[in-house]
Structures are given as C-alpha cells and as structure tokens.
Image: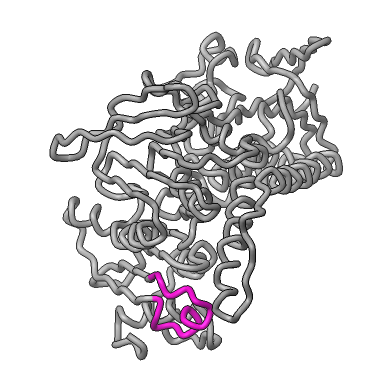
Amino acid sequence: MYDLIVIGAGPGGYVAAVRAAQLGMSVVVVEKDQPGGVCLNWGCIPSKNLIHQAEVYHALGEMEAVGVTVDRSTLDYAAVHGRSREVVKTLTGGVASLLKRNGVDYLVATATIAAPGEVIAQSADDSRRLSARNILVATGSRPMEVPGFEVDEQTVLSSTGILAMTALPESLIILGGGAIGCEFAYVMNSFGVQVTLVEALEHVLPTEDFETCAVLDKCFRRSGIDVRVGTRAKELARAGNSVTVTLEDGNGGIDSVSAERALVVFGRTPNTEGLGLESVGVKRDSRGYVEVGDFGQTGVAGIYAIGDITATPALAHVASAEGEMAVEHMAGHGPARSKMDPDSVPSAVYCEPQVAGFGLREDRAVADNIAFKKSVFNYPGAGKSIAVGKPDGLVKLLCDPETDEILGAHIVGHNATELLHELLLAKNAELLPEDMGDMIHAHPTLSEAVMEAARGLYRPPIHA
C-alpha cells in the first residue's frame, strides 16, 4: 500500500508527488501520457519557446539600424517548431528524473477511482489495482468546445493544434483575446502572419487591468495586428483551405473575416470525466469543477483535488502551490497556507510587451466602491527602457488611502512578468510603498519604474 496515489503528472501532480516524497510518503503517479502535463508538453513551455524565437526573429529587423541586412525570407518554421519540441523533451525528461530521484513510482496508464483509497490503473496491456491512504486528483483541463466552432486541427485549431503546426499560414483569425490568444497573436505576427484578434469583451486580456491592456492594444495595432474588441464571433464557415468568421460588433454591425486558419481559444474545460468521482461520492459543481475545502479536500475522506479541475485560477503555479499545500495537509506537516488567496496570485502574459498583475483592479474597485489611491509610472521614465528600445509600458500601484496597504499592482512592458514579484513580495510581507520607494535600486534598470511608482504614492517621483 502506498501513502499517496497521484492521478496526473502536470505541474500540480508532479510537484505534489515530489513534495510528498520529501515528507517521507510513499508515492505513485498514474499518468496516461508524458510527465509534465499540458503545461510542459502542449502549453506554457513550448509556447514560451516560440515567443522567445519570435522575439529573436523580430529583433533581426533592428539590425538594419546599424547597417546589417538580414534576409528573413529563408525562415524555416519547421525548424522553429522542432526547437520548441526539443525544449519540451528536455524538460519532461527532467521531470521524469526528478520523480525517480525522489523515489516516486510512475505508471503510464489511465486511472479510475474504484473506491476511497483504491485506484485501477489501466494500460494498453495491463490492469493494476493500487491502494493508498490518500488519492490526489490533478488531471488538468483541455480546450473548451463551443458548438459551431468545432476544432479539426486542420483549418480550425486549438492551442494544442497551433503548437503542433510545422508550417506558417499566410493569415490567422484568433477567436479569444485572453492570455493564449494574445501570446499567439504576438508569435504569429512576429513571424509575418496576417493576424486578426477577436475578443467579445471591451478589451484584450479582459481579466487584467484596463490601463495595462490599453498599452498592449496600442502595441498590437502598431505592429499590424487587426484587433477587434467588443466583437462576438457569430458563425464559422469552412471552405477548402480557408475559414470565414462572421463577426458582430457592439453596435450590431455585421462583418466577416476570412483567413487560412482559425485559432479557437474561448477557454478551458476541467478533465473530470471518466475518473469515477461520482461513484465514490466526490461532488462537482454545475461547470464540472470538483468542490474542495481549504486544503484541496473533497467531501470524501482521503481524496483531494487540485489545479484546473477546481474553481481556483487555472494557472500552473497555482496548481503547484495547491499540490504542496494538499500533501503537507495529508502529512500533518502544517502547510504554509490554508487556502489560495486569489489576490496574491500573480498573472503573467508573455507577449511583447508582457502583462502581469495581482490583486485589486481599478475597475473592480470602482464597481465595488472600494476606496483606493493609485500611482502610475510610465516606462520611459526609467532610462533603461529607452536604452534597450522597449519604452512601451507602465507600472500601476493601488493602495489603501488610509493605511497604504498594497491592494494590487499591474505592469505592462518589457520583463513585466519578472518585475512584478518585488511588488508581490512587498504585499505578502506587509511592506509599505515607502519601503520600496526608499530602497536604492540599481541604475539603469527597469525596476526603477517600480521604485518610482511606489514613490508616487507618498511623494512626487523624480523622473515622472
């Protein structure tokens, strides 16, 4: 008998397995595919490699300013794709080694919960019944299917399909302006694809701060992306090797856009079917998410659930943190946190410029009558942004008007996803804007923009 059976080897499952092993638990992971889940195989990692290669390719044009001409017509996108898969192979192999080094058993099989503490692992040529004191379900999510916009991975692609693509289309319609849509809009546009980006809500990245998104929108349009916000996709028609999408704007106006390919990224659906959850009494809500307590416990003793199959933010770093929290609770170790505070979860979008944030957004504060004061510092005030040719961006801080408690922070600009963590650490450590603003920051750095934004909450910044 094991101490723990983990179903799923994504960033939630494998991190939980390693942490459990560190705490002295005997662990087996049951995963039907490669270790790393969607994140390492068909999500975070390959997409970030494509973004990196797109940045390098796009930057070749800047060489003309110093008299160097580069022939970019010889781009071999199959080689670009191949490099992204090499990165995946390296990291999934690393996860497999990590599990092995920590003494975690790994079974390539499909898991079904037969009873509390009992899992049937079915592989192509074998069926095993596993027993454990605890079961952790971490099966992740998949692209949402919307009637009328069915994916065939030929002309209509999901996020998985576009990552498997080995040749660039001439044109692409992206339906959904969230993180995935914006990242692929940047990648495809950088490689010379004609991109139309469609978002039903009032701005791209609708879960992010509106001022940061306005900067991204401006940069996208300047680079040639056709951004359609406040616009709904009504119908998709396929004809040969192209697609046509009928669009309706906020005023009821109808338009149609044709392209060689469409990317449909309306959202994701939890992978909770076929696990035997209902048969053992684990409850799901109307959207299919598993109902859990503060430490990931379901209503059935000894069965936990984490990551995208619960109603917490569908982010890899959230799944990893939840995995650690759940197994520490099982082991009686006393986890560092008892629940996931959504206002302390960083978001990160890796297009250029990057967008990152956490906590209170200004629009939400206004709608909920939450008192706040804010400071906004624009990137050009930090000399390095001009020096490296990345002046588009801003740092925005929201604080309590009486206590100066940091309520939220939002950044758009070069390396925003890295800069955010100074602010998040300050919030978690209950530091005040003065603590950041009075700290000497190296010059020239982009982090000086964080310093100046913090100063703007209690004194005039120097370089505003």
Q: Quadrant of residue 197?
A: top left
Point 38% across, 64% down: residue? 409
For the C terminus, the quadrant is: bottom left
Q: Is residue 182 left or right of 375 when viewed as pictured?
A: right
Coordinates of residue 135 in the picture (x, y in percent) = 65, 25
For the record, the magenta segment spans 379-393
Q: Does residue 282 appear left or right of residue 113 in this picture?
A: left
Residue 291 showing in the rendered view: no
Judged left or right of residue 36, residue 156 is left
Q: Residue 64 placed where, x, y %?
A: 57, 75
User: How many numbered circles does the render carry?
Assistant: 0
From the top left corner, tell me how far across and down residue 394 is, in percent. 37, 71
Q: Is residue 445 magenta?
A: no
204 is higher (above) or lower (below) than 71: above
Residue drawn at 38 percent across, 44 percent down: 196
Query: Based on the displayed image, in which of its 4 quarters is residue 22 positioned?
Result: top right
Q: Taking 157 as reference, is 343 above or below it?
A: below
The front one of 295 and 215 is: 215
Residue drawn where x is 62% and y is 55% of the image: 73
The verdict on residue 383 being magenta is: yes
Q: Is residue 149 left or right of residue 365?
A: right
Looking at this view, name the residue that lies furthest to the bottom.
Answer: 462
Between residues 179 and 287, which one lies in front from this camera angle?
Answer: 179
* Residue 372 rendering spot, x and y as whole percentages: 23, 66
- Is 385 drawn above or below residue 4 in the view shown? below
